[in-house]
Image: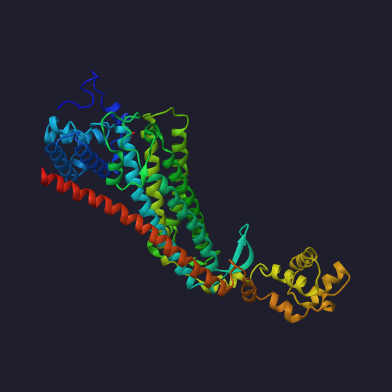
Amino acid sequence: MSNILRRGRLASTPDEDIMEFTSSMKADKWIFDADIMVDLAHTIMLKEQGIIKDQDCSSILNGLLRIREEGIEKLDHTYEDIHIALESRLIDMVGEDVGGRMHSGRSRNDEVATCIRLTLRDEMISLMEELHVLRRTLCSVASYNIETLMPGFTHLQHAQPTTLAHHLMAHMDALGRDAERLMCAYSRVNLCPLGAAAFASTGFDIDRERTRQLLGFDGLMENSMDAVSSRDFLIECTAVLTNLMINLSKMAEELVIWSTSEFAFIELDDRYASTSSIMPQKKNPDTAELLRGKSGAVVGSLIALITTCKALPLSYNRDLQEATPNMWKAMETARSSVRMMEGMVRTMGVNKEVMASKSVMGFTTATELADTLVRVTGIPFRTAHQIVGILAREEGEIHLQQIDTVSYRVLGIKLSSKGLTEEMVCEALDHISNIKKRKVIGGPAFEEMEKAIVRRKGTMKRAEEEISALRNGSEASLNKLIELVKQYITKA
Ligand code: ARG
């Protein structure tokens, strides 16, 4: 059969090179399943509105189910996109007098936008689920490292003592915002453009509400021009993915650094490591490095996507075909990165002794000492900062006597005369007591961390319930659609 799309208006056919350039078949593997669903829903609506006959509807639905079973490989890949390949296969099966009626009252423009949204919504749900597995893992690794001491860093210099739980829960919270952003973006993704046709809607008496409902969308992309031309949902989603990848990349960077012999805080499980082809002793944190590297490609996808969409006039332009794969690529990378990070964190070995011993290095208790001088003697913080700073510069251990010597130099008084005792100095310099004192909300104190973990588990549970409601809703509507299809096939 000649090409159902080109046989009317166009006289010559593109050669392979042109087809390779213009076809979206490769990327359309993402939307094959969705396209079948969209075709099924549209066909049912056409029948219910009396636009096509019951018998034709039944044959089309039947054909579509067969194509679904055959899979995408059976389609003719020389067509310019999945929509035409699918329609041609249908017409092959059921004849043009029947199959040729499916595309009444719609265009590939509303069709493709609907397919992308339908597929994306499930990808987003899967990602949200995977992200919550990672967040649960962070919570559980944190919960048995509440008392695992480590140096906290600023500028990658030892700064103040903290705990591994505090550190991991920081990442946990950052990823929580990514999860929230995904959920927000989802509400703008799960809207139905179908019925917008090319851009001006259609003169057929279609029922947009019905196809929206059959496909389980929460609402309509109402304005038919906006429906076919807007891809801000792709930009928004890819921006959310980019942010997520940046957060994961920061974590990956730490896993790399923490695995060095200089740090030796952790050891990744062998399955996430590689070795050298020449240096037999090497254990390299390749999975973490690759995650860090792949985050760059996701940033690139976002830039490519925005640049493609920039300055496109209304309404549909073929450029949009180039926009979509950027998002798929970003989605695929983000989902696998989340899974890799989860596995690495869950299986890593934690060298608690090394971390604890390093937490005392680099005078990480200096802030607490300065704070103690302020609280006990009433001197201004800035003066205490100067005194402790001078002590940090000098060699040797710090005792009340050294503090008195410096304070005498700076202030002309010995702080012991203001009530400072050796015991107080000792306590200020003890890193465990440092952590215990930091019990304000969000601080690393053991009991505060325990409470924080409980709070996070609570919010996660609520978020997980929301996500599973989305999952169930999406699955239920598509199952219902298939049920209805089967009814309509047997009825006719
Ligand atoms: N492959 C196209 C895309 O991804 C489908 C829509 C084609 N529409 C058209 N008017 N050529 O955007």
Q: Is residue 329 left or right of residue 255?
A: left
Q: Residue at 22% of width from left, 42% of height from top?
A: 40
Q: Please say whether residue 167 is visible from this viewpoint.
A: yes
Where residue 146 appears, as percent x and y from the top left, is 52, 73
Q: Is residue 427 left or right of residue 206?
A: right
- Ligand 1: quadrant of the figure: top left
Q: Residue at 40% of width from left, 61% of height from top?
A: 464
Q: Is residue 288 above or below residue 70?
A: below
Residue ranking furthest to the top: 11
For residue 313, which quarter of the picture?
top left
Q: Please say whether residue 297 is visible from this viewpoint.
A: no
Q: Residue at 31% of width from left, 32% of height from top?
A: 197
Residue ranking furthest to the right: 412
Q: Is residue 249 left or right of residue 224?
A: right
Where residue 153 appears, as percent x and y from the top left, is 61, 62
Where residue 347 appears, as percent x and y from the top left, is 41, 67
Q: Is residue 299 above or below residue 267?
A: above
Task: Locate the C terminus by quadrant.
Answer: top left
Q: Is residue 179 left or right of residue 208?
A: right
Task: Locate the N terminus by quadrant.
Answer: top left
Nearer-the-camera pick, 122 or 486: 486
Nearer-the-camera pick, 75 or 492: 492
Where residue 352 appears, as percent x and y from the top left, is 52, 73
